[in-house]
Image: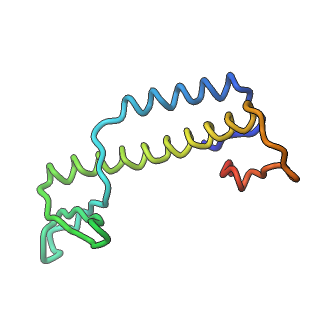
Amino acid sequence: MKVKNCLSPRTLEATYARLREQLAQTGWISQGYVQDRGPGAGGPCYQWTRKVKGKTVSVALSQEQYQWLSEAIGNWRKLQNILKEMQQISRQVLFETLPNPKRRKRLGKKVLVLI
């Protein structure tokens, strides 16, 4: 969901509170990617890949581990989207409600990363 500039401070606060609740309900999280390579792949059927210190690391998984990690990675991606939206709202509230220094021109949406 993109944050709109015309929202009132109350609406922004309510949206922020809803996002905080979503954060609190987030389950297990993990970075990386999981894949089901199928039985004819010539190697492990389930695999987890991620970056560690700039290098790609892959780990063979059982089906149960694959399912668990798949859900955890989905939660991680949702968490990242929630945090991005919370940052946008925070910046919008900051620059709309607190006094600004004198500027030659107004700060644009691109500078505030609201778009």
Residue 48 placement, left or right of 82? left
- Residue 62, by quadrant, is bottom left
In the rendered image, the residue lying farthest to the right is 104
Depicted 13 relative to depicted 75: above or below:
above
Residue plotted at (78% across, 50% down): 107
Q: Position of residue 31 (x, y in %)?
A: 32, 55
In the rendered image, the residue lying farthest to the front is 101
Depicted 73 relative to depicted 41: above or below:
above
Residue plotted at (30% across, 36% down): 27
Q: Position of residue 33 (x, y in %)?
A: 31, 61
Q: Position of residue 115 (x, y in %)?
A: 68, 51
Image quarter where the N terminus lies is: top right
- The one nearer the camera, 97 or 78, is 97
Colouring chosen for the image of the structure: rainbow
Residue plotted at (27% across, 71% down): 56
Q: Position of residue 53 (x, y in %)?
A: 28, 68
Residue 41 placement, left or right of 6? left
Depicted 47 relative to depicted 70: above or below:
below
- The one nearer the camera, 88 or 71, is 88
In the rendered image, the residue lying farthest to the bottom is 42
- The one nearer the camera, 27 or 13, is 13
Count numbered badges in the picture. 0
Residue 47 placement, left or right of 50? left
Residue plotted at (20% across, 54% down): 66
